[in-house]
Image (cartoon, grey):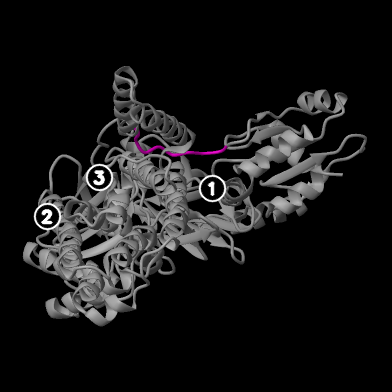
Amino acid sequence: MFRIFILSLLVWLTAGFAQARQSLPVDTGNTEIMLVSGHDTVTPGSRFTVALKMKFDGNWYTYWRNPGDSGEPVKIVWDLPEGITAGPIMWPAPKVKTVGPIVSYALDEEVWLPVEFTLDETINADRTFTLKAHAYFLVCDELCIPEDGALSLPMGVGAEKLNDQHDAQIASAVDNIPQSANATGSVSLESGQVVFDIAELPSEFINPEIFPHANSIIVHSNPVTRTSAENGVRFTASPNYGWDDGTPEIFDATLVAENGRAVVVPISTDSRVDIGALKAEGAAGNIGLLGAILGAFLGGLILNLMPCVFPIISLKALSLAKTAHGERGPVRRAAWAYTAGIIVSFVIFALMIVTLKSAGLTIGWGFQLQSPWLVALLSLLLFAIGLNLLGVYELGGRFQSIGGGSVNKAGSFSSFLTGMLAVIVATPCTAPFMAVAVGFALTGSAITTLSVFLALGFGFALPFLLIAYIPGLLSRLPKPGPWMETFKQFLSFPMFAAAIWLAWVLTQQSGADGILTLLSAGLALAFGIWAWGKTGVVLKILGGLTLLVAMALPLTLSATKGETSLKANTWSAQAVADARAENRPVFVDFTAAWCVTCKVNEGLVLNRKRTARLFDRTDTEFLVADWTNKDDVIAAELKRHGRAGVPLYLVYKPGAATPEILPQILTYEILEAALVE
């Protein structure tokens, strides 16, 4: 009798869930998952939709089809009867999750992932079938844990019958899936940036964000800029590894507007979409041409006070002080030559920007300092000027160095070159009023760009023109005397400081190899100057050749990504035992490529030079247990230490019986305290 009762209860429960057309819910730890159908029965030859419903506890979340910098997308493995096929997951729009420098594309709270099924016409109309699925996914909060669950959903075959409870829910889930729009898009790699052009978006599609479906297209943690155009929008981002071997294949991208509406846009990689002229964004779009010219003029005036140009401006001031109490003619000619050098430089910049813009490239203020070879040449030039100011060498004549010539002789040519140099070294700085004005110029027409840059140049040059033409100002400058030689020598140190700063910029662009090339060029420059200053013909020839080498070496530089990574060995229990037998401390990093917190700790703490020095100083063995792929041995070790996921950081100190478990959020201080007695 009891067996009959139990059997009847099971039949009733099965019938109940079949009628509800949802699978039994499965609690995977931090998520409840189930399969939900909008149909009770389906017709042979028809299509129907079933959704994987996921409900996350608290702040836990999983990953979209493109997880971003870290993570893995949800995966469903189907076990289906013959004659039934499943389509791909239909993905809703993602949300951006930021943990430190790591940017991920996530799904949280309650998520519905619809899948469309097709029944073959030969399916027996008087039978039932069961959809079996195994869902695999990561859930993350402060740590990341892989979860999975097996699901089973019985379905009936016959005349189509919708499920009253779930039909509307499935329809709503499908409606929330971004659909293909009439919009078209293209992508290209320009000046080291990925440029997306999207045309024909819906008119109400305001301030969209772009999410490429392919993970390898952009670096997700770097900023993505958006610029409106007459017939579309442009996104500019940093390229990811997908561009290493050439142009990626055609892919799709989801665009999400600020009101939440989303569309899918096909992105072409072999043609260019016409979006018309770019528009200025924000405040720059409202100031107008006259406002931009005024802002540029004021910004140019203030630019004289910025630290970037202090070394060069000081040289010009010293030149004026030396000649201020003599005839006015040479002073004014030098001031106009200096102004001409500034104006010519800004006109060249404007023409370069117009030319590159017409070629479809994206360019900005200070673009020349994005070239490592030019940064290196400028550093060498400032170093050479500093040596000249110290009196290490004297070339004589009007070519006596760009800065030094304007100190020792107010020659027009030397003043012209000083003006050009001042503009080049000024571009790392942006003075007040400049940002909006330059932004307006960079997105405007050729005439607009030229007008704004001319105003910027006149503002930059005006103070020295005023000094040259106002007797009262000239008379206030100190009279020449022995102090000028001391001050000239003092000015060499700002030159050296500027050269050092440019060397630091170069390390960010070209890493250790770049700084080695620059130092080698500096050595060649110093030797060339010394040899050129000798009287012997052979030494002069050798010096000239060495100077050519010094100028040629920076031209070999290119941008690279300099990284500092600790040298690590693969974790195993034996590797830990071997290191401990040598009485060495051991640091074990249990990590995974999809673990957001792991990547944050790597970027902020582990992959740092001072951490590498700490490990060298303490003779620490660094072992990595990579749990990116399923590994039962690592899983067992995590469980042994009371963890279900990564990150986990263990420090084995010499003589200690058990390891110390470090916090999941690492700092250098925590690491140092654990390794240093």
Q: Residue at x 49, y 45 (%)?
A: 72
Residue type beneath disc 3: Ser
Position of residue 434 relative to residue 670, above or below, is: below
Picture coordinates of residue 620 (x, y %)?
76, 34
Q: Amino acid at mark 1?
A: Phe
Residue 371 horizontal side relative to residue 114, left or right: left
- Distance (Cα) linking label 3 and label 2: 17 Å
Does residue 427 appear left or right of residue 25 in this picture? left
For marks 1 and 3, give the one nearer the viewer.
3
Q: Nearer the viewer, residue 595 or 531?
A: 531
Specify the amino acid type for callout 2. Answer: Leu
In the depicted structure, whether residue 440 falls above or below residue 539: below
Query: What residue sits 80% from the left and 50% below the top?
Result: 673
Magenta part of the protein: which range? 557-564
User: Please, what secondary structure does the residue beneath circle 1 have?
Assistant: strand
Within 10 Å of the Cα at label 3, are there few (<14), some (14-19), or many (20+) other Cα atoms?
few
Q: Residues within 10 Å of mark 1 (few under 14, many from 20)?
A: some
Does 330 appear above or below 373? below
Can you tell which mark lies on residue 351? Answer: 2
Residue beneath the point at 55% across and 41% down: 593
Tell me the residue that label 1 is attached to. 137
Q: Residue furthest top?
A: 538
Residue 191's mark? 3
Cα distance in 3D space between marks 2 and 1: 53 Å
